[in-house]
Amino acid sequence: MCLRQYDIIFQCDLLFFIIVVERYIFYFYFFFWFFFLTFFLCFLFFFCFFQFLFCLCDLCRYYF
């Protein structure tokens, strides 16, 4: 009886541990990908924007 009770408690603790760890892993991955994609897209946008500006400057200098 005592062993069985301990086994049930252990299973509940293990289940709780798995739920908590799964939640933290999910949050970590979510925030990691969210920030990574945000910074990456901002970087691409600014990079392309500045490249475009430099091309315009070169064209203006070339034609005028």
Image (tube, rainbow, N blue to C red):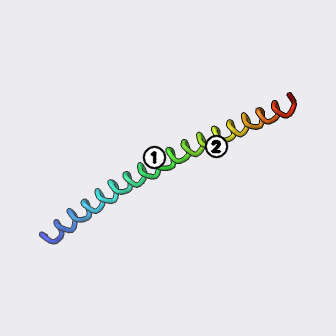
Which quarter of the rendered picture does the N terminus lie within?
Answer: bottom left
Q: Residue at x 77, y 33 (%)?
A: 56
| Secondary element at image label 1 | helix
Q: Position of residue 21 (x, y in %)?
A: 34, 57
Q: Which mark is residue 58?
A: none
- Decide: is 43 above or below 59: below
Crowding near the residue tagged with mark 1, few <14, some 14–19, many ≥20 C-alpha atoms within 10 Å: few
**In the figure, is residue 58 to the left or right of 47?**
right
Q: Nearer the viewer, residue 34 or 51?
A: 51
Q: Nearer the viewer, residue 16 or 48?
A: 48
- Decide: is 48 above or below 24: above
Q: Residue at x 52, y 48 (%)?
A: 36
- The residue where tag 1 is placed is 31
Give, as a three-letter code, the residue at label 1: Phe
Q: Are marks 2 and 1 in contact (CB under 8 Å)?
A: no
Of labels 2 and 1, the one closer to you? 2
Identify the image quadrant of residue 62. Answer: top right
Q: Position of residue 37 (x, y in %)?
A: 56, 46
- The residue where tag 2 is placed is 44
